[in-house]
Amino acid sequence: MKYKALHDRFHWNNFSYEIYNKLELDLENLNTEKLKKNKLLKPLNFVLDYIDSTSEEKPFLPAYLIETLSDYYYQKSPHKVKEVIKATKTNGIDNESVIKQLGGMYQNIDVYSNFIPVFDKQFISPFNDNGSSYYNFKLLDTQYLSKKRLVHLRFTPKHKGQDVFEGDCWVHDTTYAIQKITLRPAVDANINFISGLSLIQEFKLVNDSTWFLYKDKFVADISPIGNKKISLKGRKTTTYKNVHFNDSTIAKELDENKKAEEVSLLPNVLDKPDSFWKKNRHEELSKSEKTVYVVLDTLEKNPVYIHYRNAVAFIFSGTKDIGNIRIGPWYYWLSDNIWEGPRMRFDLSTNKDFDKHWYFNNYLAYGFNDQKFKGRAEIRYEFHRTPWSYVSLSYRNDLDNGQMYTDQLGTDNIFATIFRRPNIPYKFQNVEEKKLEIFKETNKGFAFGLIASSKQYNALMNLPGKELFPTTTGRAFNNFETSFRIRYAYLERIVAENFDRTSFGSDYPIVELKYTHGFPGILNSSYQYDKIDFSVSHYLKVSPYGVMYINLFGGKIFGTLPYNFLQIAPGNELYYYNKYAFNLMNRFEFLNDKYLGFNIEHNFGPGLFRFIPLTRKWKFRQFWSAKGVAGNLSDANKQLNYVGNYPFKSLDGKTYLELGTGVDNIFKLFRIDLVWRVAPQPAPTETINHFGIFGSFRLSF
């Protein structure tokens, strides 16, 4: 183990190489007789003629292939990484941010490191600094290769239920460098949908004493519905050529970086002719890989296949493009609540075919009980995609549905009706908002936002109305404010689709700071105030003990305001677990004008369940959570807001605390949370739930 740092390529001051990546996807366990009898699939039966029944033990149908050729540069200190994608064949994928994920930047596997990523899991490496605590090693034999003596070692798990490997490796007996290694997850490793997986890496001498990676192959059998049902086999092969290290030209190349890690695409990367690939591939395509291109070319001309593909995409994405217009998501089309009754909503937006810079996003909704239309309209002009910058103007007139995050279940959703908890008074208010936003992102991880907005609230049910809040300036429940927001997310991974972006997080904490000032007398605004808010969030890998989500937040409001403009601690009135809210707190239960809180969740992986044979077999996972907020409300804000018999409260400097635990990965999909409301103690006249059971679901490996 003491020699591993000498052979880890990341110990060099710098290095570079050319990468050739190819990813093949195959279908296995196809019941050809059943498929041929299926009337819906009959027009596509010709595809079954391409099944390969000779190359491997199990027949398979080659289905998809991606090839990428790029130059990769790395510098240790100061840390800089650059990848230049020179060519790619993606067979239908033309999204630049997705193409950037297909090179070598985000697919580096280092067997010398303490932990090796397998999908979204961190497996303990056989060459972990404490590897002997997790593995048994056995010397098998020795062989000579090119006059180099190699020692053959086998490693097996020392304990059951841990995320470790089994396999073997060949080690050069003079330098203690790995020449070849094969890794397979332990049989009882806690990973979903994988019926088989292997990782093979091979190293070559590039001078008298330096062994450098020249090929790795990753093969995974993905079986989401059972090992004997139709499954997917993925094969990723990466080869490395033209290796250089400790070279001054690499440093000069990286001096051009605008940020620490960047991926760029050369012009026309998608348009390289077959002659280019024939000349520049590191290795010739196999029989099955050649078959993929034949199958895909044929399918792309088949209208039945195109129709089915679009239908599946619509179901899973929720949206559908018709020309340069996008409709959906479909799951907003129909919902129901006690105020609106049945509610219908239709979303319409433009896509990138309409214009690369201009974006229009609108929806119209109608409630059959209140017989009122609601909606939103936005027009945005994007100056740049990377780094992102835009200006937008929007108008919204709709119910406040309580949704704060994109992955949070709001009330304007067909599923929210099903999961609502009983005996909790509904609270509805309408919000009319006009907003102008200017956003600018930098290459250094900073993002700046300037927002000017006017909001007008109207209480509808179980909330005090504006008649109880008389003002001398403007109208009650009206405001006009400007906000300045700074966000810092170092090396955050982003995938853009159409005009939306999805963050895949960062290995570093993400920090946000926001300052807001309210102006009276503008657009009938009634209030003058200042607000400061901050948030720090981080996914901390504590391998081999799982992952912790940590969020610290706080803020202060200077001014006397009605409840709409105070900090309302986020509650949850659904049986569906809300990661970002206090699940045993009701909405609008606690008002604050200063607050400080935390949200911590620790996912152990198998945890204690690995010691119980049945739960180890079922791959249950363990977690705990703790959420708390300490808050207060000034006397002036209490006097203004404690009106009538409405259930507003203040924490009065005390801390609200929830603790939770439960079982995750039930049937590889569901999660059950057991949550306790620990503090503060309720008043003698109050009736609250001190304990609750919540459910949720998600797909993960």
Image: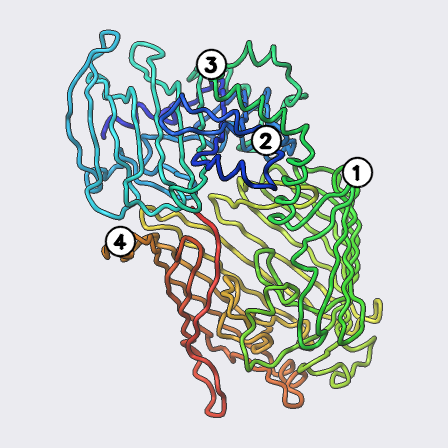
Number of disc labels: 4
- Residue 201: quadrant of the picture: top left
Q: Nearer the viewer, mark 1 or mark 3?
A: 3
Point 51% across, 70% down: residue:
575
Residue type at the position of mark 4: Arg
Separation (CA) of disc 2 from disc 4: 38 Å
Spot occupied by residue 95 in the image (x, y as percentages of width and height): 64, 34
Q: Secondary structure at mark 4?
A: helix
Quick check: 539 above or below 218? below
Q: Secondary structure at mark 2?
A: helix
Quickly name the residue at label 1. Answer: 355
Q: Secondary structure at mark 1?
A: loop
Spot occupied by residue 624 in the image (x, y as percentages of width and height): 37, 62
> Relative to residue 103, is residue 670 drawn left or right?
left
Quickly name the residue at label 4. Answer: 610
Quick check: 189 above or below 270? below
Separation (CA) of disc 3 from disc 2: 21 Å
Spot occupied by residue 27 in the image (x, y as percentages of width and height): 48, 33
Q: Nearer the viewer, residue 370 or 529?
A: 370
Other residues around mark 3 within 10 Å, as few (<14) / some (14–19) / many (≥20):
few
Dot 1 and dot 3 residues touching (CB under 8 Å): no
Separation (CA) of disc 2 from disc 1: 21 Å
Separation (CA) of disc 3 from disc 4: 43 Å
Quickly name the residue at label 2. Answer: 99
- Mark sitting earlier along the chain (3/2): 2
> Relative to residue 444, is residue 439 drawn left or right?
right
Q: Nearer the viewer, residue 170 or 80?
A: 170
Q: Secondary structure at mark 3?
A: loop
- Mark sitting earlier along the chain (2/1): 2
Dot 3 and dot 2 residues touching (CB under 8 Å): no
Instruction: Determine which of the numbered discs, if any, sits on residue 283 in the image.
Output: 3
